[in-house]
Image: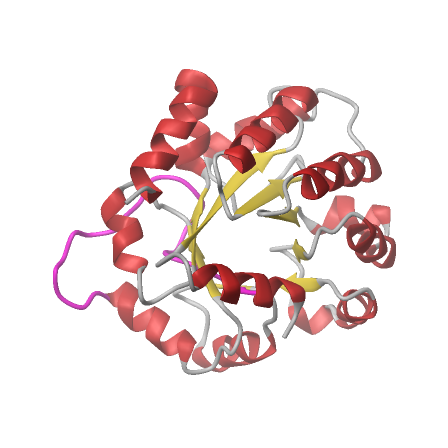
Amino acid sequence: MSQLAAFIKEKRQQKPILSMTHVVYGYPTVQESLDWMARLMKEGVDFIEVQFPFSDPVADGPSIVAACHKALEQDLDVDTCLSQIGKLARDYSDSRIVLMSYLNPMYRFGLDKLAKRAAEENIQGLILPDLPIEQAASYQAACASHKIDPIWLVTPVTPKDRLAMLAGQSSGFLYCVARSGVTGHSSHEEKSQKTPLDDYLAQIKQHASAPMGVGFGLRERSHIEQLMGKADIAILGSALLDAYNQGGQEAGVELLQTLFTD
């Protein structure tokens, strides 16, 4: 069992579901993004998914795209990002940080170097949503060498054979996209009986030995409650960014407490 999976297993003994929040590094400034990450960790989030911005974030909806473009008005570099979030990882040991970005900036940085530097900074997971697993042999080898979990994504339209393959190869946790499309507003339906989302997660669970995180479109307490007993991590992205944009850290924390506090 990887360090990340062991952390999730231990935390899940205390909570019905874990929280993962998404923050764009450098938005609206580097220091403000780091301050927001620190505040979230002080508030007790279990994970922060730190996105190193890219000009064409194809999986992301308008809120995160706008944040990435604003962040890229500054001169950002991957190594500095890793050093700065590594300090947060050391300062707040009850939480974990995973780095998310797209292949282009990470490939330019060097995938082996990325895994090595992530390990040095105690960043235990990497998410590259546009890197197909079939073309990732060297990346997987680098991650294995440095004991980093490459986190794969599956969606409701992933073909069954491919879903089984991705779930079977997952470690750390498997990122389960809750619905088709980009991040942002939810198409969840309020239903008391079994929903297609339940069927989808049950199908994944047949093949995945790693924990399961679910994201895309989570905005209401009922969405989080629907995942309890079916997933290990609820991932809050665009909704948290929208709250932050509207009312700063306090509005973001209020949303977090509304969704995750019993």
Q: Nearer the viewer, residue 166 or 173?
A: 173
Where in the figure is residue 69, as x and y percent of width and height? 62, 27
By secondary structure, the bulk of the magenta-drawn segment is best described as: loop
Hey, which quadrant is residue 71 in on the image?
Answer: top right
Where in the figure is residue 187, as x and y percent of width and height? 27, 48
How has the structure been colored for display?
A: secondary structure
Does residue 245 appear in this view?
no
In the figure, is residue 144 to the left or right of 210?
Answer: right
Q: Indicate whether residue 184 is drawn in magenta.
A: yes
Q: Quadrant of the C terminus?
A: top left
Q: Vertical placement of 80 versus 245: above or below?
A: below
Which residue is situated farthest in the top direction here?
A: 247
Q: How many marks?
A: 0
Q: Vertical placement of 239 versus 188: above or below?
A: above
Hey, which quadrant is residue 149 in on the image?
Answer: bottom right
In the figure, is residue 138 to the left or right of 173?
Answer: right
Q: Quadrant of the N terminus?
A: bottom right
Question: What's the residue at 34%, 44% (across, down)?
Answer: 260
Question: What's the residue at 70%, 20% (across, down)?
Answer: 73
Question: What's the residue at 58%, 45% (across, down)?
Answer: 49
Q: Indicate whether residue 250 is drawn in magenta.
A: no
Q: Which residues are magenta?
A: 173-195
Which residue is situated farthest in the left direction here?
A: 192
Where in the figure is residue 116, as x and y percent of width and height? 85, 56
Q: Nearer the viewer, residue 189 or 170?
A: 170
Q: Vertical placement of 10 versus 186: above or below?
A: below
Question: What's the residue at 56%, 27% (across, down)?
Answer: 36
